[in-house]
Image (cartoon, rainbow, N blue to C red):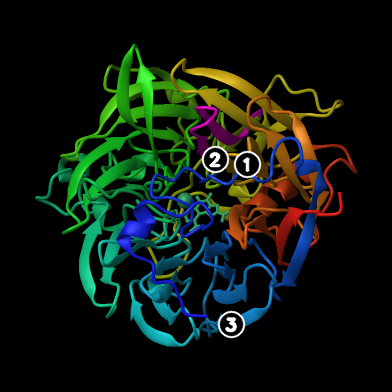
Amino acid sequence: QTYNAVTDARLADPEPGNWLQFRGNYSGWGYSPLDQITTENVKSLRPVWTYSTGVTEGHQAPPIVNDGMMYVSTPQNQVIAFEAATGKELWRYVRALPDDLFQLHPTNRGVGLYGDKVYMATVDGYVVALDASSGDVVWETEIGDYTDGYYSTLSPLTADGKIVVGVSGGEFGIRGYIVALDAETGAEAWKTYTVPEPGQPGSETWKGDAWKTGGGSIWMQGNYDPKSKIAYFGTGNGGPWMPDTRPGDNLYTTSVVALDMANGSIIGHHQYHWNDAWDWDEVSAPLLIDYDHDGQSVKGLVHAGRNGYLWQLARSEEGPISFVAGQPYVRQNVFTGLDDKGRPSYDPDRTPGTDKTVTFCPSLWGGKDWPPEAYNPDTGLFYIPSHENLCSELGGAPMEAREPGELWIGVPLDVILSSLRFHESVDTSKPVPIGKLQAWDLSEGKLAWEHSFMDTAYWGPLLTTKGGLVFTGGTQDRMFRAFDAKTGDVLWEFPTNSGITGVPSSFEVDGKQYVAVQSGWGVDSERMRALLEDMLPEGRVPEVPQGGVIWVFALDEAS
Ligand SMILES: O=C(O)c1cc(C(=O)O)c2c(n1)C(=O)C(=O)c1cc(C(=O)O)[nH]c1-2
Ligand SMILES: [Ca+2]
């Protein structure tokens, strides 16, 4: 079979039967235009094939499909290629990772496709380009020094001849950046820091040398408008965590930045919250959605913040981003209000600092951490995988000098790993609603429906389809579920090998629709679960079995 090269035109307007990138399209919707699997027949969805990845930890990447060929990445930076319909393995790339690599976040969120190659950003700070047909390494380029705390977990944005990625390390005192590599050669095309140096725009929001270790990491794929050639990336927490260590607003941390794809310059931004104090990384890129607001149609950017607010912004052809509306989607007790530009004011009693311990809601994992939202143009609803009723008790401690490659958070690790609290209204003698799948009507600015998951962490990336469904896992009971996208009714569920933190995708081969997802629990979903186990009575919070498996489902033809 000859490989169907992935072009800008195909990425901008993907065939309904393919899933060519992280969220299926450049707008970040997580929407499949396939409608063979419907609200009526989803009850006869069955596994067609499975595959053990051979590794443990958090499997988060979507199965990415181009004309019958599937590419899946796993923790420890493997890429496995399959015949999508049969599961026949075509090739496998296993990265040789350095022995001295410490992984705070052992995961990978997926490959990027462009031309005849498959691209992956790695936990040891490289981008690797593989031949899509053979799996042979075509080039690899170092983008960050892992011995200095830089690493990558995101899927690459592929567009305009470039492979665009960024670096993690917000808990290691890095200075974040986004870097574009030439898709053919791997040579650097541009590199843009998310924290400006003295003299650059935004540098007035920093004092002294704090910018050198200011954080603002990039660990989720950006979305992209192919008409204006602008990429939108979300940025991570300020580093170190305690806000008094870096006075000022700290642009462009906890923001969305608009980048000119040609040269990487920042031509627009919106900071969701200034001088972050809660580890509320705002790394999920906003979805490009057009919605009505006050009788006007808005070319929008929509983001469910880790800070617990649902943000509706407007984008522009020139770059600048403007604020339209913001409101809490979970209980939030930190912001006391928003001004007309969307800038929040804070309750100082909910703002931690060095030697200042406070409780705040939502928790440091936010109203939502990294698992992506979804938008369904048929229902007009925006779906959020959220956490309710969780708060954190957190405070910093005086810091030692930064050591390259060592954690540099300013909050002792044992404090972080015992920081979770229930909201004061919670009665733990009864099942506690924690995970909430929410559906929002953006034009009304109102919740349309929600489904609560009791006593469980919920780290479930979303897939929505033209068949009227929302697929998600994310719970400790190992289930993969399908919801009615309009009503929130549970229509189907299936127990997999482990908990599902994988991004689901949907594709078609020879006229048949498939839904695919990785099951393999780990990283912060497990850190949260372990805390909940201590907070709830014995037996209520089960352990989640370890090990990664790729699952592919289709309708059972016999039924
Ligand atoms: O600041 C950073 O650079 C950074 C990176 C990552 C990552 O790369 O996965 C996470 C976080 N922060 C983080 O705050 C967080 O809650 C988190 C959860 C996860 C995960 O995979 O479950 N990664 C990360
Ligand atoms: Ca972080």
- Label 2's element? loop
Q: Are the residues at dot 1 and dot 2 in contact (C-beta closer than 8 Å)?
A: yes
The local crowd at label 1, few if under 14, some if 14 to 19, many if 20 or more residues have their Cα within 10 Å, is some
Q: Nearer the N terminus, badge 1 or badge 2?
A: 2
Disc 1/disc 2 C-alpha distance (Å): 8 Å
Q: Nearer the viewer, residue 19 or 148?
A: 19
Magenta residue span: 373-389
Residue 29 lies, in percent from the top left, at: 47, 42
In the rendered structure, find residue 527 and report the number of the disc placed on it.
Answer: none
The local crowd at label 3, few if under 14, some if 14 to 19, many if 20 or more residues have their Cα within 10 Å, is some
Q: Nearer the viewer, residue 402 or 528?
A: 528
Q: Does the numbered disc 2 mark a residue whose Cβ is under 8 Å from ligand 1?
A: yes
In the rendered structure, find residue 419 and report the number of the disc placed on it.
Answer: 1
Q: Amino acid at mark 1?
A: Ser
Q: Residue furthest left?
A: 199
- Label 3's element? strand
In-image side of 47 versus 518 (left or right): right
In the rendered structure, find residue 364 and report the number of the disc placed on it.
Answer: 2
Q: Residue furthest right?
A: 539
